[in-house]
Amino acid sequence: MARAVFGADPIKSGKIFLEGKEIKIRSTVDAVKHGIGYLAEDRKKFGLILQESVTDNTVLPNYHKLTGALGIVNRRQCRKETERYVDMLEIKTPGVSQIVKNLSGGNQQKVVIAKWLLRDCQILIFDEPTRGIDVGAKSEIYRLLKELSDQGKSILVISSELEEVLRISDRIVTMCEGRVTGVVNTNEASQEILMNYATAHLG
């Protein structure tokens, strides 16, 4: 569903509304134009160019902001913007020229987040945001999600970890076999309730 909302997969049925108005998303370009960013479950395959630098990964969808009238990329501005987000997100790297492949999983994830924040996306879809990262990095990601939410950004998290869902969510939607099976506020939810909803069409 998230890939369809982001325009990466075709939409077979249904409509997408943004701030009360129906929008058409036929490609990822359309989604980004509407301020939607998607952090894929497999960040190494879909979110990053591992052999490129922190700077190149951060500015990748943002060259329109960093290109002059003659079509020349302002490398100094690219570096400056990247350094700003490295500081903001506390990305642990020797420098913005560091190859992303050499960063830890948690810091790689932060580079993907930096990319979409520089794009000024107001809706961020996180697909399994803490998969493959250590406990300390998970806490940092949770803190960052809270900060982004407090800034007014809409955060959609997809997670198979019930404890994580209960910890970071305001509202939880469960799906099974492609259909919504439950909608519950976090203060009314428990792992048992969520499992019942999530397996509603199984068996």
Image (cartoon, helix red, strand yellow):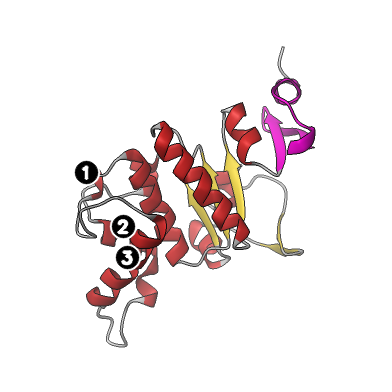
Query: For mark 1, what is the residue?
Result: 102
Q: Which mark is residue 73?
A: none
Residue drawn at (32%, 65%), measured in percent from left and top?
Answer: 82
**Category of crowding for the residue at label 2, using alpha-carbon neighbours closer than 10 angstroms: few (below 14), some (14–19), many (at least 20):** many
Q: Which mark is residue 57?
A: 2
In the rendered structure, which amino acid carries the disc numbered 1? Answer: Asn
Residue 196 magenta: yes
N-term mark: 2 or 1: 2
Please, is residue 71 above or below residue 148 in the view?
Answer: below
Give me the C-alpha separation between circle 2 and circle 1: 13 Å
N-term mark: 1 or 3: 3
Q: Dot 2 lies on which element?
A: helix
Q: Quadrant of the C terminus?
A: top right
Question: Are dots 1 and 3 in contact, CB under 8 Å?
Answer: no
Q: Dot 3 lies on which element?
A: helix
Please, is residue 42 above or below residue 150 in the view?
Answer: above
Residue 40 shows in this picture: no
Please, is residue 80 above or below residue 117 in the view?
Answer: below
Give me the C-alpha separation between circle 3 and circle 2: 9 Å
Residue drawn at (77%, 64%), measured in percent from left and top?
Answer: 20
Residue range in magenta is: 171-200
Q: Dot 1 lies on which element?
A: helix
Report the side of 110 relative to 182 (left or right): left
In the rendered structure, which amino acid carries the disc numbered 3? Answer: Thr
**Category of crowding for the residue at label 1, using alpha-carbon neighbours closer than 10 angstroms: few (below 14), some (14–19), many (at least 20):** few
Q: Using the rendered view, name the quadrant where residue 53 is placed.
A: bottom left
